Amino acid sequence: MSRPLDVIFAGTPDFAAGSLKALLASRHRVRAVYTQPDRPAGRGRRLTPSPVKALALEHGLAVHQPATLKSAEVQAELASLGADVMVVVAYGLILPAAVLETPRLGCLNVHASLLPRWRGAAPIQRAIEAGDPESGVTIMQMDEGLDTGDMLLVRRTPITATTTGGELHDTLAELGGEALVEALDALAGEGLDASPQPEAGVTYAAKLSKAEAELDFREPADALAARVRAFNPWPVTWCALGDDRLRLLLAEATPPASAEAPQAPGTLLADDGEALRIAVGPAGDQVLRVTRAQLPGGKALPVSELLRARADRFPPGLRLGRHDEEAPA
C-alpha cells in the first residue's frame, strides 16, 4: 500500500468541518489546520472559534489563523510544514500563487457544486433556487482563478422537490468528506486524471444577502417555493404581515382549487388546515402553499399549529407582502 499523505487542511465553517472529520478518520496525516481568525458571535459578541478550529483543537492539531496568506513570513511557515498536499474547503482567504505551488501535490479544493456550474460563494442555495435536478461535490486542483481549476473527482446527489438548503448542505458536507478521502487515496497511489472544466455551462453563485429574502408574490409559484427551500435555514424568506414580518420556511407550488378565481398577488386564500395558501404569480392565478412559518417572537412551527393558535392573524382575503410600487424589485 502507498504511504499516507501529509496534509495541511484549510477551512472555516461547518461544511469544511465535515471534510476535516472525514480526513481525521482516514489514514492520511493532518499536519496543521488553517482557519479564519475568531469572530464575534452571539448576543454577547464574544470571540468565537470557527467550527474547523473547534474540531482541530479537540484532536490536538496545530491551528494557524493568519489574517492573510500573502506575507512572506506566513508562506515560509506553511512551507516549513513539508506537506504533500493542502486541502482547502470554504476557507475564505485567497491562496497566492506561492502557496498554491508549495505542496508537492499542490492544493485541492472541495467545492459544493457540479463544476463549472455554480462557481462562487453560495453554490448550494443557488442550485436549489434555480430548480436544478441535482447537485454534488467536485474535488478540484486549485489554480489562481475563481473555482476554475481542473476537476479530479465528481460525486452527485439529487435535489428533490422538498430539499432545503440546510439538508443539501449536510448531504454535500458528508459527500465531500468521502470524495476527499477517495481522491487522496488515489493521489497517494497511481494518481487521478485531471479534466479541464468545460467552457460551456459556467454559472456564478453570488453570495446570499438578507435583502433578497423578501418575497415578491408577483413571481411564479415554482420560483417562490424554490427560494423558500433554498434560503432555509439562512437567510430565511419572509413577507410583510401587516406591520410584522412572517418568516416562511417550507413551501410548495400547488394548483388553485377548481372554483377559485385569480386574486391580487399575496392574497391569502382559504387555508386547508395544514398550510397557508397564497395567490401568487403575475396574474395571481397560481398558489404558493406554505407548510412551515414563524411569527415574530415565536418559534418556527408547522402552519397547522399556527392556524390552531393564531388563526386570527391569517383571515382569507388578507393581503401579505408589499404591493404594487412598494414591492421589492
Image: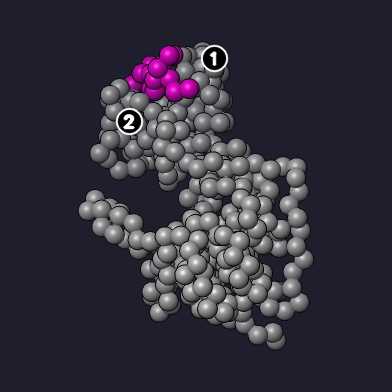
Residue name at image x 51 percent, y 13 percent: 261
> Would residue 201 be counted in the magenta stretch?
no
In the image, 233 versus 80, the foreground residue is 80
> Would residue 321 be counted in the magenta stretch?
yes
Q: Nearer the viewer, mark 1 or mark 2?
A: 2
In the image, 73 versus 242, the foreground residue is 73
Please, is residue 172 above or below residue 283 in the view?
below
Q: Which mark is residue 57?
A: none
Does residue 310 appear in this view?
A: yes
In the image, 25 versus 303, the foreground residue is 25
The N terminus: image quadrant: bottom right
- The residue carrying mark 2 is 245
Q: CA distance from mark 1 to mark 2?
A: 24 Å
Residue range corresponding to the magenta coloring: 315-329
Indicate left or right for 269 with 282 as reference: left
Dot 2 crowding, Cα within 10 Å, few <14, some 14–19, many 20+: some
Residue 280 locus on image (x, y percent): 50, 22
Residue 255 locus on image (x, y percent): 56, 25
- The residue carrying mark 1 is 283
Dot 1 crowding, Cα within 10 Å, few <14, some 14–19, many 20+: some
In the image, 214 versus 143, the foreground residue is 143
What amino acid is found at the position of numbered circle 1 in the picture?
Ala
Colour mapping used in the image: one colour
